[in-house]
């Protein structure tokens, strides 16, 4: 009997559109191809409304703009927690979040699924929260002796209260060039590279527009930027080390990652993420491959990631130091292109992710979550 | 009865036309399909209706039939108010039988058109072609056999074409009318004419040989293809060997690796295989995804053959073409140059890269020898994952079970993943897999179109996917 898998995408996030591509091209299609699942697409609108229906599996609904009409006419999804999880009276066996950024990848959705007591694909709530906070992730890495580039952080309120003072404080602590990032956003949104105090101030303003927490990091010298997709629960398994190739700006920004290298230029949703601008697998100086993989796996474990993730690392090619940069618990298009190059088809990848979700759920089910006591009898 | 209502769907007329088009307006096949089909929603699985002029005319014919039926129904309902309930029953009966009237009614204009227009016109074309061929100075080569004809024809065309003016029947134009149309387009200055002779029933090869009068011929191999229309394998063999009455024994090349060809007693001693072609010895064979290499030697002469064709099974027929080209006066240098230009033919062991994997399209292959050859290549390919995709073979007559169980057994020892397009032979293939204790991955697909269009989701770097055979929608 086929298992029913609900796939969630869209959401109240700056990465709403990217999530649609991830879901439709890299999750729903291969799950259907696997032939073992009945797929229920759940689209979460930019306003946070949940809707469902088979038409949502068709990219043309979104690319043609007809989605707006569809949303207006669609009935919202009803969710039932009855010891399991039901959507519109259909029992769901496994949830597959295909969401990026806030209210999806940041642990919020995972919290709902935990409450419902249902297996779900990808990182759990706590690790998602840590992974999606660049400051927390770096702090956890540092605590586990994983090198990170020097950084400071400040809140939006702190910056807005004293913009000049806070800018000067950051400038005094770190050495240029610096990267200014919103702490919780992915896909390089709101990130700026700065080399002067004036640029730093502007960049902090930009970051504060997107997030309530801002991280400022020192750039790594002699930089080779690499990324490693990983799947697994107890035994993480890396794919290939990939080097995102930057343009003249030396910077892997949103446009580079998703628009220039992505489907829009080449015309197909099947083109995923960054492969158009990647060196895959990267050719690194001798000995660095192992170091990169070890650092990536150590980070994955330290952050408690399960299911899947992508660890971004920065290499100082001169000193051969590998720094943890950030981690992505649900990478765009689940980094299917990298797994495919590593010899894992997208169908096998989603199958394995579903199995990992079930395995974790089964392991967690062994834990005792209740405790019998005579406490209430006192009243 | 469960799906009776599907005959009243708006898509029903287009489904009928789709099937007529799929069967190339073969009324017998069309009506067989119609009588067998229950659910008319799930017919157009592989492609869609091509709105040709003929289809538009037939669509109009359907609309006319439906219009007449409706008029009669309305008249019957009216008459029921005057003459009683009996007419209501007539209207109801007409309504229920309307889909059948439409389906069979379509056959009438087609049959009349064929009888009054098509056949007389074809007769004239064939007679003119015969006349033109009688005056044509070109030497003729005929290619006959149950399988491998197109490959042999294309190799001959390319190899001999490296020094001579060659024309060959295009695509599958291998019937009297197809060949005649081809002949009518000839300029008259061709040195060599290559004809593919099709066969579906006893006498076909004789009829085509009478038309083209071949000097040389190749029998590529014989198997169970069209067994249903031949009635027996003996008939198939006899039909293909009808060509020996038109070609001298020393100019008739036969495939020694085809047991049915080998078993037939006749005067010709010109055999070809992956070891020899006539008195040429074949050796040093190597094959990979980018082509096949081998040598041919004879009395101090050596030909270094290198083609883009995939698989050892291409060696024999290539060697025969080479031997024939040499007999016709093509130099060794030109033969070698010609061979280098031989690329895989469309849908016949045609490799294409996909995300670091290779997908070999062999969907035009429709015989058990092709299956064996493809699996043999896949087995020795060294791919990370050897993936085999097939719906099975059509038109295998009474041997359908035996042939597909054998295919299942062959698959079991050759691949890591097998993808079966579900149909009436799937269980036979699975039985073969079980018998050989297949321990790879078995995937069954009920939507072939979806599978083919999303193949990229299924492959990964290092894989070789071999897609063999096609199962058109008129088969179940």
Image: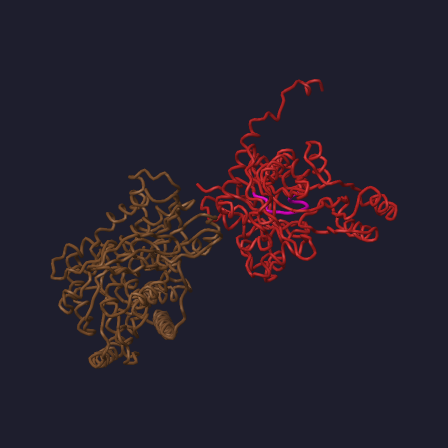
Chain colours: A red, B brown
In the depicted structure, whether residue B125 falls above or below residue A345? below
Question: Quick one: B124 or B302, which is closer to the camera?
Answer: B302
Is residue A54 in the magenta section?
no
In the depicted structure, whether residue A245 falls above or below residue A355? below
Q: In the image as oriented, which residue stretches furthest toward the front?
A: B300
User: In which quarter of the view is residue A154 placed?
Assistant: top right
- Looking at the image, residue B262 sits to the left or right of residue A118; the answer is left
Q: Is any atom of residue B100 visible in this view?
A: no
Q: Position of residue B472 (x, y in %)?
A: 34, 59
Q: Position of residue B146 (x, y in %)?
A: 23, 60
Task: Name the residue located 39 percent from the left edge and 43 percent from the top edge.
Answer: B416
Question: Quick one: A252 or A88, which is closer to the camera?
Answer: A252
- Looking at the image, residue A93 sits to the left or right of residue B88; the answer is right
In which quadrant is the N terminus of chain A drawn? top left
User: In which quarter of the view is residue B308 placed?
Assistant: bottom left
Q: Position of residue A121 (x, y in %)?
A: 57, 40
Please report the bounds of the magenta region as a residue range: A96-105
Is residue A102 in the magenta section?
yes
User: In which quarter of the view is residue A132 placed?
Assistant: top right
Q: Is any atom of residue B247 visible in this view?
A: yes
Q: Main secondary structure of the magenta part?
A: loop
Question: Quick one: A57 or B248, which is closer to the camera?
Answer: B248
In the depicted structure, whether residue B287 falls above or below residue A233? below
In the depicted structure, whether residue B469 falls above or below residue B58? above
In which quadrant is the C terminus of chain A drawn? top right
């Amino acid at each position: 009997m086929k298992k029913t898998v609900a796939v969630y995408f869209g959401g109240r996030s700056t990465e709403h559109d990217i999530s649609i591509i991830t879901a439709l091209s890299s999750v729903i299609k291969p799950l259907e191809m696997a032939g073992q699942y009945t797929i229920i697409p759940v689209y979460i609108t930019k306003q946070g409304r949940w809707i469902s229906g088979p038409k949502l599996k068709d990219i043309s609904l979104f690319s043609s703009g007809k989605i707006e009409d569809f949303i207006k006419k669609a009935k919202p999804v009803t969710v039932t927690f009855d010891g399991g999880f039901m959507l519109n009276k259909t029992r769901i066996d496994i949830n597959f979040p295909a969401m990026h950024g806030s209210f999806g990848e940041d642990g919020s959705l995972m919290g709902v699924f935990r409450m419902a007591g249902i297996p779900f694909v990808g990182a759990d709530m706590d690790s998602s929260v840590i992974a999606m906070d660049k400051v927390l992730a770096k702090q956890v890495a540092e605590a586990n002796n994983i090198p990170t580039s020097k950084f400071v952080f400040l809140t939006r309120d702190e910056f807005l209260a004293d913009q000049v003072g806070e800018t000067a404080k950051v400038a005094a602590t770190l050495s240029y060039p610096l990267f200014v990032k919103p702490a919780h956003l992915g896909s390089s949104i709101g990130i700026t590279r700065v080399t002067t105090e004036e640029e730093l101030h502007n960049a902090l303003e930009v970051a504060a527009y997107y997030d309530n927490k801002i991280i400022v990091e020192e750039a790594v010298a002699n930089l080779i930027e690499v990324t490693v997709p990983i799947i697994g629960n107890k035994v993480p398994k890396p794919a290939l080390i990939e080097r995102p190739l930057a343009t003249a700006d030396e910077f892997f920004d949103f446009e580079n990652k998703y628009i220039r290298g992505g489907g829009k230029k080449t015309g197909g949703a099947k083109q995923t993420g960054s492969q158009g601008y990647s060196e895959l697998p990267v050719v690194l100086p001798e000995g660095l491959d192992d170091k990169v993989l070890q650092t990536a796996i150590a980070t994955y474990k330290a952050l408690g990631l399960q299911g899947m993730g992508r660890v971004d690392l920065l290499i100082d090619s001169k000193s051969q130091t590998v720094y943890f940069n950030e981690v992505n618990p649900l990478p765009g298009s689940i980094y299917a292109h990298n797994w495919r190059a590593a010899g894992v088809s997208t169908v096998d990848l989603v199958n394995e992710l579903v199995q990992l979700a079930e395995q974790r759920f089964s392991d967690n089910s062994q834990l005792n979550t209740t405790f019998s006591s005579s406490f209430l009898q006192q009243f | 009865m469960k799906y009776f209502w599907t005959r009243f769907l708006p898509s029903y007329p287009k489904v009928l036309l789709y099937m007529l088009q799929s069967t190339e307006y073969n009324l017998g096949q069309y009506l067989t399909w119609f009588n067998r089909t229950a659910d008319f929603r799930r017919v157009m699985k592989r492609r869609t209706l091509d709105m040709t002029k003929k289809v538009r005319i037939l669509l109009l014919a359907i609309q006319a039939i439906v219009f007449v039926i409706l008029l009669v129904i309305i008249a019957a309902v009216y008459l029921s108010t005057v003459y009683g309930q009996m007419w209501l029953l007539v209207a109801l009966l007409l309504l229920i039988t309307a889909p059948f009237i439409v389906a069979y009614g379509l056959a009438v204009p087609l049959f009349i058109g064929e009888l009054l227009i098509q056949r007389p016109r074809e007769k004239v074309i064939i007679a003119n072609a015969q006349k033109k061929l009688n005056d044509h100075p070109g030497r003729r080569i005929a290619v006959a056999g149950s399988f491998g004809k197109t490959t042999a024809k294309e190799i001959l065309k390319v190899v001999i074409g490296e020094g001579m003016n060659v024309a060959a029947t295009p695509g599958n134009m291998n019937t009297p009318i197809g060949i005649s149309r081809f002949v009518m387009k000839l300029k008259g200055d061709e040195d060599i004419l290559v004809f593919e002779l099709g066969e579906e029933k006893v006498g076909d090869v004789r009829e085509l040989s009478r038309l083209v009068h071949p000097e040389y011929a190749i029998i590529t191999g014989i198997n169970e293809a069209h067994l249903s229309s031949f009635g027996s394998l003996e008939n198939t063999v006899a039909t293909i060997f009808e060509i020996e009455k038109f070609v001298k024994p020393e100019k008739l090349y036969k495939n020694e690796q085809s047991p049915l060809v080998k078993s037939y007693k006749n005067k010709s001693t010109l055999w070809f295989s992956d070891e020899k072609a006539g008195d040429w010895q074949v050796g040093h064979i190597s094959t990979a995804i980018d082509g096949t290499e081998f040598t041919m030697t004879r009395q101090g002469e050596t030909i270094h053959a290198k083609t883009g064709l995939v698989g050892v099974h291409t060696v024999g027929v290539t060697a025969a073409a080479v031997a024939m080209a040499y007999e016709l006066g093509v130099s060794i240098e030109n033969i070698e140059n010609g061979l280098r230009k031989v690329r895989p033919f469309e849908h016949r062991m045609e490799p294409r890269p996909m995300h670091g994997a290779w997908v070999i399209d062999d969907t035009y292959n429709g015989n058990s020898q092709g299956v064996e050859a493809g699996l043999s290549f896949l087995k020795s390919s060294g791919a990370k994952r050897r993936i085999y995709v097939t719906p099975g073979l059509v038109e295998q007559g009474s041997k359908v079970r035996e042939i597909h169980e054998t295919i299942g057994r062959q698959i079991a020892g050759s691949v890591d993943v097998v993808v079966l397009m579900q149909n009436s032979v799937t269980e036979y293939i699975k039985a073969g897999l079980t018998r050989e204790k297949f321990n790879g991955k078995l995937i069954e697909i009920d939507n072939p179109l979806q599978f083919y269009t999303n193949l990229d989701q299924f492959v990964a770097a290092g894989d070789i996917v071999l897609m063999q055979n096609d199962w058109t929608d008129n088969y179940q």
